Image: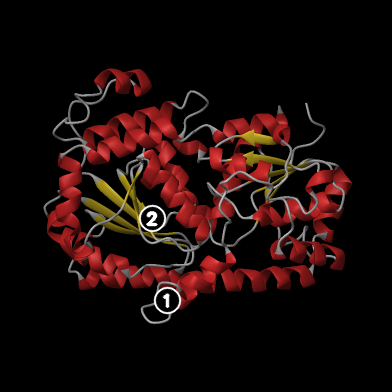
């Protein structure tokens, strides 16, 4: 057994890095530390990371605005651009991003992190590239980094690949290929998948996931169009499928930690209003932990005329902090049937057997996530938002949503948190 629990490090920049770290933290019983807070960062480092967070979140929010949005989407795309992987070649040369990290490491960024690690000589597990790259560059030899997208920028790789001793967890086959192209030795890249919430898994046998999926499939396939054609494979995977749905199908609309794309709810919700009143569909609008996004979504619910249906077919999910939001969202996803989201790290939640409807990507990494899910059969592009009820009903009745749910279950690994824990703790 290792001599110490890993030091688990994330950063509060959107929700993706926190969402990836928390399941590992809970499973191992090790606290999740934030890169820009004590004991890992002093006041100077905190201010530096705050500037990076402001740029990231502001660009994400502004990218959805009607007039300036295209400019900020282009800016985000340029900042996150990922070079083509094919034809296969060496992509390990430094970029402006790796040179920036090297320069900042020489100036002292990350000194608090390395001091903390050196005091315990515990393994570092991080879901953000910067602490892994800097700690590795400064000579720390027990570094593990989880990539949080299906395809990744060169900045995730080591500054000096030839001498690096950093280890990486790859959430997808493409991410593994990328890391090797960036110069990481193949034996240091572990195929893991994404760490999904333990509350939605039920242990290594995935008993809760299987039970949730079986009930979800009965709701997603009311005509049994998909179930009857694939019964043997389905029951071998998750057990018996209930004969009838236990509640109407539910759409969870999760718009991202920065509140980007909240206005989409105002476009698709009117189409579903009658179905919500008739208890034909349920909708949950996820505001995250931003009170201003919650207020905006609640205003939309009122304007659509569904204020009296709160808690009876329409809800706005909000938590004042990340952990309360995370717990509330997991509880809702256990009963949900369709996840409507940006192709962020939530793309990996297809592994729970949740079909995905994608809003527009923000950044090149999200473009890659969307492509991966669409090619895997787990993702669906929306049609006209103002007619959402019509095309959702069509996809429900013909078994398409059920098929997408099964594609996610069968093609996206769900046990990533256990693979990561085994590699870290053994």
Residue lying at the far bottom in this picture: please name it.
Answer: 67
Q: How many marks?
A: 2
Instruction: Where is residue 237? Give x, y as percent.
Output: 37, 22
Mark 2: which secondary structure?
strand
- Front of the two marks 2 and 1: 1
Nearer to the camera, 102 or 235: 102
Q: Is residue 366 left or right of residue 20?
A: left
Mark 1: which secondary structure?
helix
Graded by Cα atoms within 10 Å as few (under 14), some (14 to 19) or many (20 or more), the crowding at tag 2 reads: many
The N terminus appears in which quarter of the rendering?
top right
Graded by Cα atoms within 10 Å as few (under 14), some (14 to 19) or many (20 or more), the crowding at tag 1 reads: some
Q: Would you say residue 102 is visible in this rendering?
A: yes
Q: Earlier in the sequence, mark 2 or mark 1?
A: 1
Q: Is residue 29 left or right of residue 219?
A: right
Instruction: Where is residue 379? Give x, y as percent.
Output: 35, 46
Q: Mark on residue 369?
A: none
From the viewer's perspective, is residue 422 above or below residue 321? above
Q: Is residue 54 left or right of residue 144?
A: left
Instruction: Where is residue 200? Give x, y as percent.
Output: 45, 37
Q: Mark on residue 69?
A: 1
The C terminus appears in which quarter of the rendering?
top right
Q: Which residue is mark 2?
A: 341
Q: Quadrant of residue 249?
A: top left
């Amino acid at each position: 057994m290792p001599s110490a629990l890993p030091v688990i490090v994330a950063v509060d920049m959107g929700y993706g890095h926190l969402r990836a770290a928390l399941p590992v933290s809970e499973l191992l019983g090790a606290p999740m530390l934030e890169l820009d807070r004590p004991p890992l960062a002093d006041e100077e480092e905190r201010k530096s990371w705050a500037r990076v967070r402001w740029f990231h979140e502001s660009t994400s929010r502004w990218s959805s605005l009607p007039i300036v949005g295209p400019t900020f989407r282009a800016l985000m795309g340029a900042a996150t651009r990922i070079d083509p992987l094919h034809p296969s070649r060496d992509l390990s040369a430094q970029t402006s991003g790796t040179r920036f990290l090297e320069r900042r490491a020489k100036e002292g960024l990350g000194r608090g992190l390395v001091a903390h690690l050196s005091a315990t000589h515990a393994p570092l597990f991080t879901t953000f590239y910067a602490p892994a790259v800097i700690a590795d560059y400064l000579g720390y030899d027990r570094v593990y980094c989880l990539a949080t997208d299906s395809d990744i920028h060169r900045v995730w790789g080591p500054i000096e690949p030839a001498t690096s001793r950093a280890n990486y967890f790859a959430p997808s086959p493409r991410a593994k290929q990328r890391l090797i192209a960036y110069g990481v030795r193949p034996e240091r890249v572990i195929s893991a998948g994404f760490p999904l919430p333990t509350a939605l898994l039920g242990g290594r046998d995935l008993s809760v996931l299987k039970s949730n999926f079986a009930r979800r499939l009965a709701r997603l396939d009311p005509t049994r169009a998909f179930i009857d054609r694939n019964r043997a494979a389905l029951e071998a995977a998750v057990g018996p499928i209930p004969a009838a749905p236990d509640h109407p199908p539910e759409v969870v609309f999760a718009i991202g930690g920065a509140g980007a794309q909240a206005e989409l709810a105002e476009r698709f919700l009117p189409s579903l209003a009658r179905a919500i009143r008739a208890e034909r569909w349920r909708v949950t609008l996820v505001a995250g932990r931003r009170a201003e996004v919650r207020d905006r979504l609640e205003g939309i619910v009122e304007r659509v005329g569904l204020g009296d249906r709160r808690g009876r077919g329409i809800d706005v999910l909000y938590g004042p902090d990340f952990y309360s939001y995370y717990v509330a969202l997991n509880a809702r996803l256990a009963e949900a049937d369709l996840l409507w989201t940006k192709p962020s790290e939530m793309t990996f939640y297809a592994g729970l057997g949740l079909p995905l409807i994608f809003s527009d990507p923000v950044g090149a990494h999200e473009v890659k996530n969307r492509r991966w899910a669409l090619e895997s059969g787990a993702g669906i592009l929306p049609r006209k938002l103002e007619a959402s009820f019509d095309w959702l009903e069509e996809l429900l009745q013909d078994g398409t949503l059920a098929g997408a749910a099964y594609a996610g279950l069968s093609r996206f690994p769900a046990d990533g948190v256990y693979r990561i824990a085994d590699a870290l703790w053994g």
